[in-house]
Amino acid sequence: MSIVVTGATGHLGRHVIEGLLEKVPADQVVAVVRSEEKAADLAARGVRIAVADYNAPETFDSVFSAGDRVLLVSGNEFDKGRVGQHKVVLDAAKAAGVALFAYTSAPGTLTAALADDHRGTEAAILESGVTYTLLRNGWYNENYTENLAPVLEHGAVVQAAGEGRISTASRADYAAAAVAVLTGEGHENTTYELGGDTAFGFAEYAAVVAEASGKEITYNAVPVETYKGILTGAGLPAPFAEILAGVDESIEKGELIVGTGDLSRLTGRPTTPIAESVAVALKG
Ligand SMILES: NC(=O)c1ccc[n+]([C@@H]2O[C@H](COP(=O)([O-])OP(=O)(O)OC[C@H]3O[C@@H](n4cnc5c(N)ncnc54)[C@H](OP(=O)(O)O)[C@@H]3O)[C@@H](O)[C@H]2O)c1
């Protein structure tokens, strides 16, 4: 039995591999990657490497074995039909007879277009009959804290989320939940709604950044169309700006507040406060 993690050289995947290595021998962990070179550090630590691409079904032919526990980390190629990509992994895992198929999804409350691929993938998983765990990840702290440069430059957090609140957690928190599922028992055919222990609005976030940076930072709540213009003006492709603006509309409606406590229950620790991630980002 191996634990197989896709997207292993991505931000979340790397946290998952680190967490697994604390709990199981390295030769029981398989990192599925697109670039062997990018995974050289993992191979050097004894992690088994499988090179495969969601766009090339044949590359998954011998990745999985009967009894494996699998984590499919959702892809990031929005223009390539992510449901089809994810089905490539699902079909190969099912054919091999894996014991558990976990998937990083999005909150069940999220109606923004971004959630469509996740709902489509979840439907395919349920239809396939595999034993599954749906990890419906809420938003990452890092979505905001890794984009502090323009906030500090302009002295403003600019979002189109009105007074909406959001319960984010760090990637490391979500990864720890995935590790708990992949190495623990009793998570079969279960859906977890994962998010931070406390919700905040962007005015509070601006205050947190102000406190940590010693600068004056305000929250500038703009209309959705203005926000899209700002994002495309900063070089984002229009379809992606549309997706992000849709997420802000969802935040304003409260769709990214996750009040279940599933995340801290699964990891056995409180989630990482946004202030902590801001401090890490400002140090880096
Ligand atoms: N909840 C949130 O706030 C949030 C925010 C952003 C993204 N997400 C979702 O969560 C996922 C993980 O987040 P992250 O921060 O780790 O993102 P990330 O760093 O962009 O990692 C994405 C991973 O997917 C892999 N990948 C993409 N296309 C692939 C393909 N065609 N075949 C095989 N592997 C492929 C990438 O491989 P390489 O390493 O080779 O590039 C990478 O390892 C994202 O992909 C996205 O679906 C969630």
Image (tube, rainbow, N blue to C red):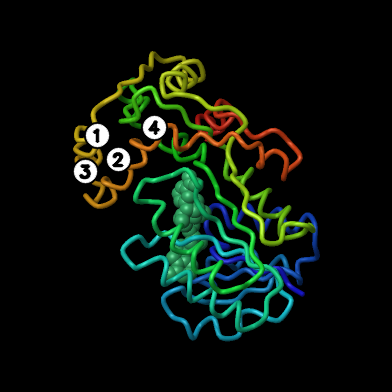
Quarter of the rendering containing residue 30: bottom right
* Amino acid carrying mark 1 in the image: Val
For the point 53% across and 33% down, the residue is 167
Q: Is residue 248 above or below residue 235?
A: above
- Cα separation between marks 4 and 2: 13 Å
Which element is circle 4 on?
A: loop
- Disc 4 or disc 2, which is closer to the eye? 4
Q: How far is mark 3 from mark 2, CA to CA?
A: 11 Å
Q: Residues within 10 Å of mark 2 (few under 14, many from 20)?
A: many
Q: Are marks 4 and 2 in contact (CB under 8 Å)?
A: no
Which label is found at residue 224? 1
- Asked whether disc 3 touches disc 2, contact meaning CB atoms under 8 Å apart, the reply is no
In the rendered structure, are the residues bearing label 1 and label 2 in contact, judged by CB atoms less than 8 Å apart?
Answer: yes
Q: Secondary structure at mark 3?
A: helix
Which residue is disc 2 drawn over?
245
In the image, what residue type sits under mark 2? Ala
Q: Residues within 10 Å of mark 1 (few under 14, many from 20)?
A: some
Q: Residues within 10 Å of mark 4 (few under 14, many from 20)?
A: some
Q: Earlier in the sequence, mark 4 or mark 2?
A: 2
